[in-house]
Image (cartoon, rainbow, N blue to C red):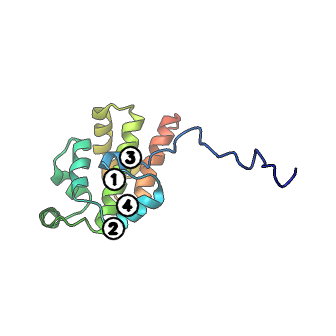
Amino acid sequence: MSPQQEDPVASTKFVPTRAASPVLGARTLGLTISNEFEAAARINAGLPSSTIHALATHLDRPNKYVLVVTNIPESTFHDRQKTRKPLSPEASSRVYHVARAVEAANEYFAGDKDAAQRWLTHPKVALGGETPVEFARTPPGSDYVVKLLNRMAHGIIS
C-alpha cells in the first residue's frame, strides 16, 4: 500500500452494537451513572439526601425505615436536608448498596414491585435470618444478595 492510500480497516470507527448495562442501583436512586468508577466517585463525594426518599419510594416504606436500615441518624439526615449537604461517604455507601439489592430484586421479580418488596423485607434463612435489605447495607452483603437472586433466577436452591 502506498503512503497516499489510507488503510480502510484502520480508519473504521468502532461502533458498539449494544449499550452498556446500567449500573445496578443507580436507577433506583434516581442517579445518572454510567459506570462503576463514576459510582465510586459519586459515593465518595456523598450522595444527595434525596436518595433516601427515592429508596424509600421503591421499598414503599417511609424515609425513617430507610434511615434505620442504613444506620443513618434521623437528626443527621434532617440536618443534611436542611443545609443541602450530601450524605457522608459512609452513609452514601450503605444507601447505594441497599439500592443495588432493591434493583436486583425488582429485576428478578420482573417489575412486580409488591413481590420484590415482600422478598426484600422478610427474613431469609440464606441470610442468617436477616432481611435482604438489612443484609445489603455493606458491599459484601449487597454482593451476596445480588448473587442469591442470580442463583434463584437459575433455579439453584438458596
10 Å crowding of disc 1: few (<14), some (14-19), many (20+): many
Spatial CA span between label 3 and label 4: 18 Å
Q: Which residue is mark 1?
A: 98
Q: Which residue is mark 2?
A: 45
Q: Earlier in the sequence, mark 4 or mark 2?
A: 2
Foreground: disc 3 or disc 4 = 4
Q: Is residue 30 above or below residue 39?
A: above
Of residues 89 and 69, the one nearer the viewer is 89
Drawn side of residue 32 relative to residue 91, left or right: right
Spatial CA span between label 2 and label 3: 36 Å
Residue appearing at x 24%, y 48% in the figure: 54
Q: Which residue is mark 4?
A: 138
What is the secondary structure assignment of the residue under circle 1? helix
What is the secondary structure assignment of the residue under circle 3? helix
Of residues 88 and 122, the one nearer the viewer is 88
What is the secondary structure assignment of the residue under circle 4? loop
Drawn side of residue 138 relative to residue 66, left or right: right
Q: Amino acid at mark 1?
A: Val
What is the secondary structure assignment of the residue under circle 2? helix
Q: Which residue is mark 3?
A: 125
Q: Earlier in the sequence, mark 4 or mark 1?
A: 1
Q: Amino acid at mark 2?
A: Ala
Q: Earlier in the sequence, mark 1 or mark 2?
A: 2
Spatial CA span between label 4 and label 2: 18 Å
Q: Amino acid at mark 4?
A: Thr
Residue appearing at x 36%, y 62% in the figure: 42
